[in-house]
Image (cartoon, coloured by chain):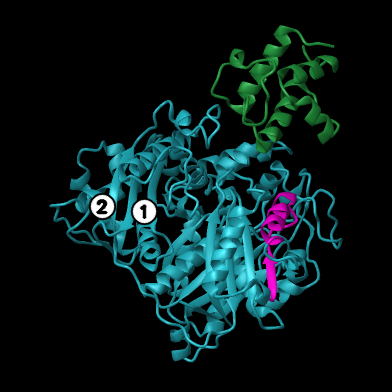
Chain colours: A green, B cyan
Amino acid sequence: MSATEAQKLQVKTMLVEQLHLRMEAAEIGDATPLFGDEGLGLDSVDAIELVAGIEETFGASFSGEDEARKVLVDVNTLADYLAAAGKFQ
Amino acid sequence: MKLAITGVGVLSAGGRGVEALRCAPQLGPLPEAVGAGLPMQVGGRFPEAEVPAADPRRAFLAAGLALDDALAAAGSPPCELILGTGLGPMELQLARFADPPAPGQLTDALPSSLTAELARTRGLRAGPTFCVTCVSASYGLEAARAALAGGRVEAVALLGVETLNRQIQGGFCALDALAKDYAPGGPPPRDGIVLGEAACCVILEPLARARARGAQVLGVLHAARVWVDATHLIAPDPGGAGLGRALDAALADAGLELGEVDALTLTADGSPLYAETYRAALEPRFPAWRARVESWETGGGHALAASGSLGLAWAVGRPQPGWTVNLTVGFGGQNAVSVVGPPPAEDPPLALGEDPGWSACAWATAGAPDLEDRFAPRWNPRRPLPAELRPAVEAGWSALEAAGWARAPGDPVDGGLLLAVDRPGFAAAERFAQQLGSTTTSRPAPFIASLPSTPAGTLGLLFGLHAYQATISHPELAPLYALQHARDLLRAGTLRRVLLVALSTREPAAQARWDGAPEEARFAVALTLERGVGELRIGPVNPEREAGSESAAGPLLADLSPSYRGLPAAGLLAVTRATAPGSSWAGGWIELHEGGPA
């Protein structure tokens, strides 16, 4: 199930607020990598913050590290996961 | 210079004395006040008979026992007390957060209050207090070596202490750094660390002096080195390059070949991250290293800031004498190595350098809006720098540029960093305590922000200062202690260059509880210090004598607004103005000489 543009914007807003990013939500590309030097440049500590932020904002959690790795790639993968799990209001 | 270890005092979960470190595992369930609701609820606590669990002054009690035992063993030589502690008397801070005292009564819960009270009650000179997470005592060791080499002090009581409380246990849980499957009595964990309490004091003095006074020499410190990866605010460089560099340098200083090493002690190697760093650093140099590894952590847990002094105690307490190499790691890729062995046949005196001077000075009350973008190769520009730290970044980088030490952001700078802070992480620690009190889960970012070492770690990361990154804490005298320590390091040749940054912050919410005034002020002064650019002689720092020295410097700071003039960091600015060419001002704690900037 693919997420809508509005749902992706919700994910981007969560990223900016939970990780205190110095950018507007709309500036984040749908396919911008979350981790690594390209893209948002998040690191392992950010990953812990992000997992907690997803749980707090959307009530979603991951079954393990493997699932988290597959989902926390970019906004597209995260928003699609949340949409499939029915976590958007 | 070789240093004799003439006294040792240890208190750990196993009890009192070095032998107790070798006891069967003392790790067990944590009391509810520490572990309830947290994912990991096992740790090592001081015996109740020695340090009552409910006493908010646990850190004072434990540190005092270790100090007293070490002094007694060494015959109580006149000492300077140098302390390493990650968070200080945290139980007292937590009590203060829960039940705010009258304004002005918060200073007794700061890390340096431990040093001040222990020194005052034992008749010792109070030296600097280092807050550099798990390598705090290792940096204290560097301070001891430099001070003793220069003859500024006759002996040093090096004390490391950390207590285990909800703040620390919760913070490490938030970082996902603790073992998940460890059960008391089980095999050593490999998926994370288990924390434990310890206080450990060693008495250090020049070998010749110890022999001359007939002291028992328990062991000899042949070398100690630090090096910082500075690739991440928390994580180490998994390639182990920094640890390897520190190890190579320490072994070279000691004149020791790898094959001569009898024992290696490692700390925090239950952490998969650190285990990889150790493997990467040791395997290429020392294929048989695993056979020589010894650890007190299997018995009492990882003792955080006390680790650096515990390595020395463990080395002199080994049943078989020989060469022990202690490796200690800490947040931000901090690596520390010490080498303890038998007394040498001869110990030639160290050739000291001349007094250093300062070559550039800058100060700031804020940072430019694009500060993050300047350091993009070393800092993710999408992550904001903390507001409290921005003046220190601005002033520090300006001084590095003015001195010609900085080439381009991202390139390493040849030198070390000393950060002097008067209220280390206090406001952030309170916010983290409140968060922990209201939930059973927590986030890593607030914990990292609450650590007194985080500002120096951030500056060191941004500027690429790998040789040294230390935080010295004192509510009034941190800049003076830092100046004195910088001078010791430069004269002893430990470092070639030092960037000294003094940072004073007054955040409105915390300030209202501190002295009743909701004032906001952030002020940072940065100095580049090196030899050959003038002369800055710094007398012994004496907390009682210096209490009124601020007013003497007043005329030098007349252009500053009153909000900044009285801050400890402003004292450093007064020093630079007083020592500028043509100035003839003379103050209490510094002997000023002609020279100043080149």
Q: Is residue B134 visible?
A: no
Along the horizontal axis of the image, is B413 left or right of A2? left
Q: Measured from the top left, where is residue A44 in percent x and y?
A: 68, 37
**Total of numbered circles in the picture?**
2
Q: Quadrant of the N terminus of chain B?
A: bottom left
Q: Chain of mark 2?
A: B
The kind of residue on which mark 1 rests is Pro
- Per the rendering, the mark at residue B192 is none
Q: Secondary structure at mark 2?
A: helix
Quick one: label 2 or label 1, which is nearer the N terminus?
Answer: 1
Image quadrant in which you'd find residue B511? top left
Task: Please tell me which residue lies in front, B440 or B457.
Answer: B457
Residue B415 lies, in percent from the top left, at 42, 53
* Residue B36 rendering spot, x and y as whole percentages: 77, 46
| Type of amino acid under label 2 | Val
- Mark 2 in CB contact with mark 1 (< 8 angstroms): yes
Which residues, given as a range, are shown in magenta? B262-284
**Magenta region includes residue B435:** no
Q: Which residue position holds label 2?
A: B575
Do marks 2 and 1 both belong to one polypeptide chain?
A: yes
Residue topped by disc 1: B479
Q: Give the chain of mark 1.
A: B
